[in-house]
Image: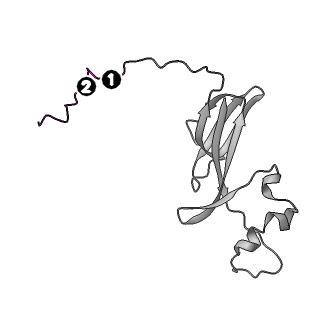
Amino acid sequence: MLVQLRQYKHEEVQFDDNRTTGESQTEDAVNPESEDYFGKDMDELDIETWDTIEYEDDPIERRSVTIDGVTAVSVPKEPTDADDPDLPGQTIQLRMGGGIENIAQAEIVEVQDLEVEEEEAEGKASQDDEPYGKESMDEEP
């Protein structure tokens, strides 16, 4: 299966020698242009990126995680030690061929079983001659 998650963590504050305590970080200081910093555009690098978002009036970081080869997805009944009540999400357990991997502070976005062949859906669909409680628009109640 292919599993897509969102994972959250507290914002990591970056300090440098040119700042004083209490001085706010500017966008340029925290997020310099990737070409200036790495010498390459971010799209050319195969790395994980965290986006800063607002959650309950506090900045936190979020990233998308896509994992292939998952055989089962579960959520522990009780919170784990890794769960942080100040962040969205909870621990998600992914079972793969090599064992179980725990992803802390995550939310499930989508799970796809790529092995299933598409078949015609079973069940009864509404037919034009069976309105199932709907009245014609031309008739007044």
Residue beneath label 1, please? 126
Q: Which residues are magenta?
A: 123-141
Mark 2 — residue? 131
Front residue of 132/129: it is 129
Tell me the SS state at disc 1.
Answer: loop
On the image, the x and y values in percent for residue 47 come to 80, 50
Q: Position of residue 56 (x, y in %)?
A: 52, 62
Main SS, magenta residues: loop
Q: Residue at x 20, y 36 (%)?
A: 137
Disc with the residue nearer the chain's start (2 vs 1): 1
Q: Tell me which residue sits at (78%, 67%) in the image.
A: 33
Write down the quadrant of residue 74 in the picture: top right
> 10 Å neighbourhood of mark 1: few (<14), some, or many (≥20)?
few
Q: Is there CB contact under 8 Å for labels 2 and 1? A: yes
Identify which amino acid the numbered label 1 is placed on: Ser
Residue 76 as seen in the image, left or right of residue 125 = right
| Distance of label 2 from label 1 (alpha carbons) | 7 Å
Q: Quadrant of the C terminus?
A: top left
